[in-house]
Structure formats: structure tokens, C-alpha cells
Amino acid sequence: MKTLRNGVDMPMTGLGVFNMKDRDETIQAIHHAIDTGYRLIDTAKVYGNEEEVGEAIRTANIPREQLFITTKVWNSDQGYDATLKAFDASLQRLGLDYIDLYLTHWPVPEKFTDTYRAIERLYEEKLIRVPGVSNHHIHHLEQLAQTANVQPMVNQIEIHPYFQQEELVRYCQQQNIAVTAWSPLGRGDSFEDPVLVEIAKRHGKSPAQIILNWFKTRDIITIPKSVTPSRIEENFHAYDFTLTAEEIAQIESMNRNARRGVDPDAPDMVQ
Ligand code: NAD
């Protein structure tokens, strides 16, 4: 668990559900994750599966209060009023009466500060437990620092061994903004990298487990995605061994600034 600035505990590992399209597969994956011990589920309006996530929560074996649900406001819904409306629609699709963490999905130019004002209001009204953002650079966070009363408590950004974003991570951690890594496994792009293969062999673990363990050494929350039961388990049980300082340095040297997603500052990002 990571204790956020307002005292709320957020699980260090969660299940990402991007690209889970099939209804039964999505519900089964979430149920399997919850049975394995996951408590954090990361969805978004744009993933088109909030209803399935809601159904999985209602039919799971544990009370809703023990789960930590993240969803996000999509780009076409940004601005103050539109965000409040989009939030209501997400709540309805999820069938919940509060969300644990609500994020601005991308910092849409000219709009993201108003979007975040709406998120602050939802926080004041106790409809969300934690206000946050995603894909925000330092300059976006600095702008929010000028306009917001309650600063974001989480920034969810792309990080994996080939794209480590050290400067942004350092900045967030100095500001007490918890960092969550999306695509933490880089969708598998580094699994055959000799550095990872060697470390994995030494510990008798998979490359995915080495990566997830490395994130923990940097105090970064991860939300790996899988619908495969054995991988869901593998990703959750990645913390029963300790990487050496040398191994951590080796993984850090894998960085090649290879972003997989779009740059938050790229104008063609906005849809
Ligand atoms: P990921 O790095 O989690 O990789 C997922 C892929 O890796 C899966 O398709 C699966 O085939 C494979 N995989 C997973 N576990 C494995 C294992 N143990 N062994 C071998 N292969 C394995 O990538 P992702 O899905 O892009 O990111 C994870 C989550 O992050 C998403 O589901 C979503 O919730 C979130 N996300 C957020 C944003 C954002 O803009 N905020 C963008 C992309 C993703």
C-alpha cells in the first residue's frame, strides 16, 4: 500500500483493463485478479468497459469498500461542466456511488485546468476519495499548482524499462504526488532484452516479475494488464525477492527514451 497525501491507502499493484473488450473475459479477469489479491482496478471511460468493471465488482467475493477503483475523464469531455457530466455518466455505468481515484486522462490544452477544477469539486463533495491526473508533464503540474487549491495526489504516466521518465518521477515524488506507471511492462517489448533475461534467470523469476519488482524499488505503483489467469497471478507475486543495487542500476541503464504512447504535448493527441 502507498499512503497518499490525504492519508488514503492506494494498492501498489493493480489490474489495468485497457483493451479488454469481451464482456465475459473482462469480468473473469477481474474476478481472478480479486481472488488472487488485487484490490486496485484501473479503467477509463474511453476503454468502453466501465459497465463490465461495475458488474465484476458487484459479483465479486468481497465488499466494494475493499476495492480501489480508478477511472478517467476522456479528452472530448474536458472542461468544468463537461467533466462533472462525464463523471456522473461513469458512476452510472460503473453502478457505484463513489470512485476512489478520478483522473484527467490527458492534459487537453486550454481545458485541463478547468477539468481539474471539476475534479476538485468532486473531491470536496466526497464523490471521489482521491483527485489525480494522468500524462501530465512538469509544466502542466506547475500550472495546476497556480490554479488548484488541492494539488493532484497521483500522476499516472507511461514508464517502463525503455522509457523511464526519471526527471518527471523525481519531480512528482518531491511534490508528494504518487506516481503510477501505465504500460509498466512496455507491452512486453523488453522481455527478451539480455539484461532482463539474465537477472530473471538469476532469481528464477520471469522478466515481467523483474520489471514489476524494480518499480517497487522506485516506489512506483503499477497496473499491468492481462486476461490470462497465470499471468495475472505472476504479476501479483513479483515481490518475494530483492534486486541488488547492481541489478537496479543495470535496469536503469536500459532506458532509451522510447515512448510507446503519444506525447502529452503533441497537438494531435487531442480527440
Ligand atoms: P502493459 O505494459 O501492462 O502490457 C500488457 C500486455 O503485456 C498484455 O497485453 C499481455 O499480453 C502482456 N503481459 C502481461 N503480463 C504478462 C506476463 N506476466 N508475461 C508475459 N506477458 C504479459 O500495457 P498496457 O495494457 O498498455 O498498460 C497497462 C494499463 O495501464 C492499461 O490496461 C491501462 O489500465 C493503463 N493505461 C493507461 C494509459 C493512460 O493514458 N493513462 C495509457 C495506456 C494504458
Image (cartoon, grey):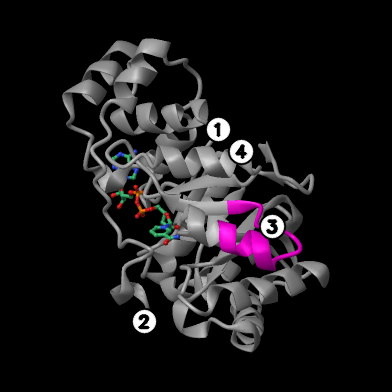
Q: Which residue is mark 3?
A: 151
Q: Nearer the viewer, residue 94 or 161?
A: 161
The location of residue 85, given as percent across then percent down, is 64, 87
The location of residue 175, given as percent across then percent down, is 64, 44
Q: Nearer the viewer, residue 112 or 27?
A: 112
Please give left or right for residue 211 compared with residue 8 in the image. Answer: left
Question: Label 4 sits on what residue type?
Answer: Gln
Using the numbered discs, state the Cα–Cα distance from disc 3 to disc 2 in whole angstroms.
Answer: 26 Å
Within 10 Å of the Cα at label 1, are there few (<14), some (14-19), or many (20+) other Cα atoms?
some
Res 68 label: none
Using the numbered discs, state the Cα–Cα distance from disc 3 to disc 1 in whole angstroms.
Answer: 20 Å
Question: Label 1 sits on what residue type?
Answer: Asp
Q: Is residue 97 visible?
A: no
Rendered position, 17 above or below 35 = below
Within 10 Å of the Cα at label 4, are there few (<14), some (14-19), or many (20+) other Cα atoms?
few
Please give left or right for residue 41 compared with residue 150 in the image. Answer: left
Using the numbered discs, state the Cα–Cα distance from disc 4 to disc 1 in whole angstroms.
Answer: 12 Å
At x 59% / y 50%, what residue is drawn? 40
Closer to the eye: label 4 or 1: 4
Closer to the eye: label 3 or 1: 3
Q: Which residue is mark 2?
A: 271
Res 174 label: 4
Closer to the eye: label 4 or 2: 4
Indicate yes or no whether the magenta region holds residue 146: yes
Q: Earlier in the sequence, mark 4 or mark 1?
A: 4
Indicate yes or no whether the magenta region holds residue 7: no
